Image (spheres, helix red, strand yellow):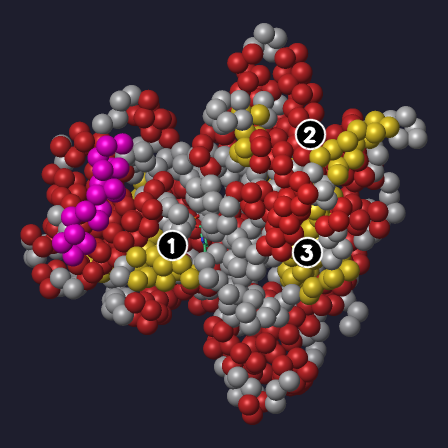
Amino acid sequence: MSEIPAPEVAVDIDPAAKEQAFAHDVERNLICRQARYPDIATQHDWFMALAYTVRDRMLANWAGSMQTYSARDIKVACYLSAEFLIGPQLGNSLLNLGLESEAREAMRSLGQNLDELLAVEEEPGLGNGGLGRLAACYLDSLATLQIPAIGYGIRYEFGIFDQALRDGWQVEVTDKWLQKGNPWEIVRPDVSYYVSFGGHTQCTTDEAGRLRVQWHHTGQVKGVACDMPMQGYRVNTCNVLRLWKSEAVESFDFQDFNAGKYYEAVEMKVVSETLSKVLYPNDEPDAGKRLRLAQQYFFVSCSLQDMLRLSDAKGLPVERFADLFAAQLNDTHPSIAVAELMRLLLDERGLSWDVAWNITQRALAYTNHTLLPEALETWGLPLFQSLLPRPLEIIYEINRRFLDDVRRIYPGDDARVMRMSFIDEAGDRKVRMAHLATVGSHAVNGVAALHSDLLRQTVLRDFAEMFPERFLNVTNGVTPRRFLMLSNPALARLLDDTLGTDWRHDLARLDALAAHADSPALHDAWRKVRHDNKAALAVRIHATTGIEVNPGALFDIQVKRIHEYKRQHLNALYIISLWRRLSRNPDLDLPSRCFIFGGKAAPGYAMAKLIIRLITGIAETVNDDPAIGGRIKVVFYPDFNVKNGHAIYPAADLSEQISTAGKEASGTGNMKFMINGALTIGTLDGANVEIREEAGAENFFLFGLTAAQVDELKRSDYRPADYVRNDDTLRDALDQIAEGRFSRGDRDMFRPLLDNLMQSDPFLVLADFADYVRCQERVNEAWRDKEQWTRMSIMNTARSGKFSSDRAIAEYAERIWATRPVRIDHARS
Ligand SMILES: *Cc1c(COP(=O)(O)O)cnc(C)c1O
């Protein structure tokens, strides 16, 4: 970690005294929290004592922030997300508090090494990948920009599985992140809410003669708040991530139910105890659907009830709710919020429909994350009806009123009404959650310019026509704290030495680096930093996989979830072709490359698991092939997660962003690589388009069909076999797979993958192969010219400012939430 400039406050205190005080607090926590004296404390005890000491340093900021937010005139942004992939907290909290060197010295005085203690922390794997990590980056930026905010989600007992490899196959291992306790968490049993499920509804008339609906549920679940601090960078702001844990309701009264309801009631009790047990992997076909919908409703209902309670505590009437809170829906997972906020306002608060609807629309905004039709969330009506009868009734009523509007605006256009309805009537009837979210929100955004355009043209076209002003783009970003300062401290220091430290508060200032792009002194220092990062990754690779890699080789890295649309198999086919070229012609003058992959496949996604097996099979065959003299190495780095990412992103020369154009909404891995000085080989997809725009076309390796060309090719009659027939290199690579070269002679293992490619190739791997190979040749040529490569690398970092999540959050705050930064006065302590 970097040497951090002293924080703006309290510079007059002697650093040695502060270290001593810090060490004293750690020792005290060791005794008071872990009940251990130093002599017999384990490394884990020391980690816990240190984490508590750091947490204590955040508590005053936390309390001060919460107190400030309770004022009437302060609007709070609430980020509702089923996932928060926050990564390890110790290093980031030290960085943001400016306590890194103090802690390092204090621990040294206690005979402990800070880096070793940092490595002890298990990360809370409360997300699948990009979407959950985005939510975490946004919390970091919200606090850093001093915007009052709460993150709302689920405290899964088991997060995303840990990935192990056995015989080259992925094996899922239960994630046990809570096993040794979570020192960051504060459980608040007093902050809890009841959430109803099942049963039926009944119409009654109240004293005032108004129609009221009662929901006679079959069971309730209690949600308990578990809070974690989200400390901003060098500010007093400390926001909260509030995750809900489900508990069975004590007074569950089985006598209330007649025999017919008994089993339903027992099922509700089981549900309540398992609701927050496990995170569902995405790309999972239909498994555990009922529980997943229950999870979504559970956390949304708890969160909205919490916001209403906080709003009441401000002493303002509920009619002012949307002036006090802005809720962002991270994809459709929390989209039931539209119906639930209506329900709370109508049934619990007694507001009229029109008033409730106005509040709901003003309070909510929706971020869409996917164009893949199979990823657009729908729920079967019978399931919805049995689990959430009252919210469904409200969805029907919103839909009825909305479709009346559609008919008024587009008279006689029944096809349009069918397309826009919340209920998909084709086949088994389903609720379309994206339609609910779109109609119930005042703003709908995509996550990169291309994605937002395609959203308006495709999946939400009718809605964009009807409400053009509602649609906008906010390109994703990543936090430069975690993904530069924390994980690449040597580069951060070099940037300080070259530019001063302004960039630490405004990443756009990195632009000034362009003026130094030809400085020989910077080139030398730049290459040294990059080489050291690669050497450090090489050590980890050897330790985890036993594979020896040369830090002098071109590190070519593709880390992200394994998915056909991300096309790890396109990369694999290129490696095979390269290996074949070198085997046939051992004297060929090609630069050494180390291909590094990482990523999890959803447990039920057979094709993705087969792609992992292909990569590990290629690694097995190629790495030990004496004919190529170690010039190609292939590594599958197991268990890619945030923590491992810290060592991976800073060590990349080449970032693989090769999804089929039009399929990747934005990508954020691409941004992490760019900030750290990797060059991108990529398609015109997601945020790659903007990365190339910022970096300059000359600093980006572009290949492949455009989204429009992909669309056209798929409309015409795409015949993947034609590409194989006409391309010897491609045919040879596929033949190698078919012959069992990567499966120890087994000719059947990869047949499903080969059949898929040859027969339908839904993601146009074969159509893009030739251009990808040509582009990789350009990469090889560029790599030969070290000066030129270094210049391109510097330019990528220099032009990465746009991809800070601070820029993204500033846009949300201004264009969607109307929230403002609030200074937190120096905390009482
Ligand atoms: C950034 C990140 C992702 C997202 O990567 P993409 O390349 O954008 O798909 C996924 N997983 C982890 C652990 C990450 O840090």
Q: Residues under labels 1 and 2: Cα distance?
A: 41 Å
Left or right of 225, for residue 205: right
* Nearest the eye: 804 or 527: 804
In this rendering, which labeled residue sits more in front, label 1 or label 2? 2
Q: Residue shown at 21%/49% (left/top)?
A: 749
**Mark 1, other Cα within 10 Å: few <14 / some 14–19 / many ≥20:** many
Image coords of residue 444 (percent x, y): 59, 33
In this rendering, which labeled residue sits more in front, label 1 or label 3? 3
In this rendering, which labeled residue sits more in front, label 2 or label 3? 3
Q: Which residue is mark 3?
A: 248
* Nearest the eye: 691 or 167: 167
Q: Which residue is mark 2?
A: 393
**Mark 3, other Cα within 10 Å: few <14 / some 14–19 / many ≥20:** many
Residue 765 in sight from this viewpoint: yes
Q: Residue shown at 81%/46% (left/top)?
A: 311
Image coords of residue 794 (percent x, y): 39, 55
Q: Which residue is mark 1?
A: 599
Sequence-earlier tag: 2 or 3: 3
Q: Quadrant of the C terminus?
A: bottom right
Sequence-earlier tag: 1 or 3: 3
Residue span colored magenta? 742-760
